Amino acid sequence: MAELILDGESLSIDALAEISALALDPKAKLRLRVAGKAQKKIRDAERFLNKLARSGETVYGLNTGFGYFAKTRIKPNEIEQLQRNIIRSHACGVGEELPRDLVLAMWLVLLNSVCRGHRGLSLSKLDTILRGLEAGILACVPARGSVGASGDLAPSAHAVLATIGEGECTVPSGKGFARVKAGAALQKAGLTPIVLGPEGRALPHQRHTAHRRDGRQALARKRPAAEDRQPRRRDDDRSAARLPPRHRRTAAARAAPARHWECGKEIASYLGDTEIARSHAECGRVQDAYSLRCAPQVHGMVWDELASTKEILEREINATTDNPLLFPDRGEVIHGGNFHAIYPARACDRLGMALATLASISERRTNSAMRRRNPACRPSSSRTAALNSGLMMIQTTAAALVSECKSLSFPASVDSIPTNNDQEDHVSMGPGAGLKALKIAEHARYVIAIELYVAAQALDMLKPLKSSPQLEKVRAKIRKKVPYLKHDRILSPDVEAICAMVKSGELFPKKISVSDPP
């Protein structure tokens, strides 16, 4: 039984990713609770909102239309219909559906925001939503249709539909998930559809941040380090072949950032004075290609981007982004623009570009291993070249993935298409930035898996010479699931198996911490 306590202040990126991942396991058990201090804030906001509704004071979305219709008042007896209509009218998304874990992440971020006490959602309705999520009831949410204005309105509306008993959802069923009508799912779980009152306007404002969890999604799962703010080790830094163990002096000469320093130290720890290195002592090669020699600099930059992204997103998932904002303690309603997602949008754009760079340098190392002049690998990484193509075409797959990463790297946040009769005249395009970052992350994992596949094959071809103990352990783990390639076979399952190992973090379980260079 996994438990998450929401308080509006301390939801971490790691907790968000770990809990939301349970939505992909039909056997997972989840318990969601609201902290006591948050419950008081929620009650205060609910009472204040009901008071506003009775007062007749004009409050956007409470007794006015939405967007372009903000100047049109709604009669008190029409408020319930207004809140139901806003959900239905905004449920206009298209395209592929978001995965269940992302839909759950959207909800967790929203409900964490509710706990800050500026929205007005009642505790009873919040409890119904929590029980539905615990039962694994998650709406089917199309991925496309939001420009990042006033929240992810289209995806959010689809997510909320299930709570009012409309639309379709997925629920755990045996070893998988079944697609059913939301009303039937609620009934089976013993829950009653929510009837939206004045607080309904708060629900469509799901957080853009749910579209881009941190660098773990971008590369490989992060393991907890000793301190919260320390960058984690990345699972792609070990396939470099001959990085000289003199990183200490080169990093100091550049006054390198701590993550550059730690990245180079991590790479060097996997290399050193090995049998393979000694066999190349007299090879006449003065220095390696940039993809090997500059790995600490390039990978260190990626670490920095991941850390920066985490800092921004962790701040965003513990923020209030509704409009208007309720301040019960001051008796104030403030109409503002906290919903603008430019910060997470920019963070995701930078993250996507960093991961595309990582995939690019990884593919170059794969290509180096395939070159004819490299004594470690034949052109096809197979001793029976010509008759067997070996791993020759796998580099083409990596190249195709890297090319797509580059195409996806154009920043979404520099664009803005006004909507709603120019009422929303500058938008963040945050959802697009987040979806692109997730796709680049997926491609980067495959590219790194291909590099590891080729590296393991190269190490096997150099037997009886051995690499370092650390790299030999990595090679052995790969070989438990992917045998040495003696003759041509279908390679896709091999790549998928290694990619799954990269994503889970099982290849490199070691934890590191960042320290200042001595």
Image: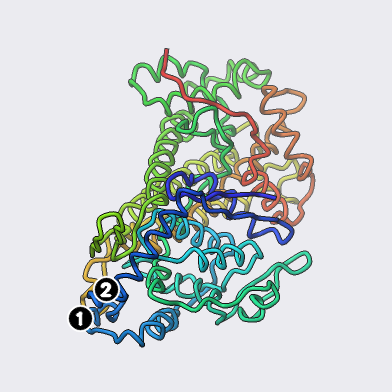
Whether residue 405 appears in this view of the structure is no
Nearest the eye: 245 or 321: 321
Judge from the rendering whether residue 149 lies leftward or rightward of residue 406; answer left or right: left
Packing grade of label 1 (10 A; few <14, some 14-19, many >=20) is few
Which residue appears at 62% of the width and 49% of the height? 3
In the image: residue 283, left or right of residue 62: right
Q: Position of residue 344 (x, y in %)?
A: 36, 53
Whether residue 22 appears in this view of the structure is yes
Q: Is residue 148 above or below residue 271?
A: below
Q: Secondary structure at mark 1?
A: loop
Amino acid type indicated by mark 2: Tyr
Residue at disc 2, secondary structure: loop
Distance in Å between CA atoms under marks 2 and 1: 8 Å
Which residue is label 1 attached to? 71
In screen coordinates, is 207 left or right of 473? Answer: left
Q: Horizontal placement of 436 versus 482: left or right? A: left
Q: Residue at x 52, y 55 (%)?
A: 401
Q: Are marks 2 and 1 in contact (CB under 8 Å)?
A: no
Q: Which mark is residue 60?
A: 2
How busy is the neighbourhood of tag 2: few (under 14 within 10 Å), some, or many (20 plus)? many
Give the amino acid at mark 1: Lys
Q: Residue furthest top?
A: 518
Question: Which of disc 1 and disc 2 is earlier in sequence?
Answer: 2
Front in this rendered view, residue 60 or 427: 60
State the image coordinates of residue 491 (x, y, percent, origin top left): 71, 54
The quarter of the picture where residue 436 lies is bottom left
- Location of the C terminus (image quadrant): top left
* Residue at position x 54%, y 67% in the image: 98
Label at residue 168 = none
At 42% from the left edge and 38% from the top edge, which residue is drawn?
Answer: 307
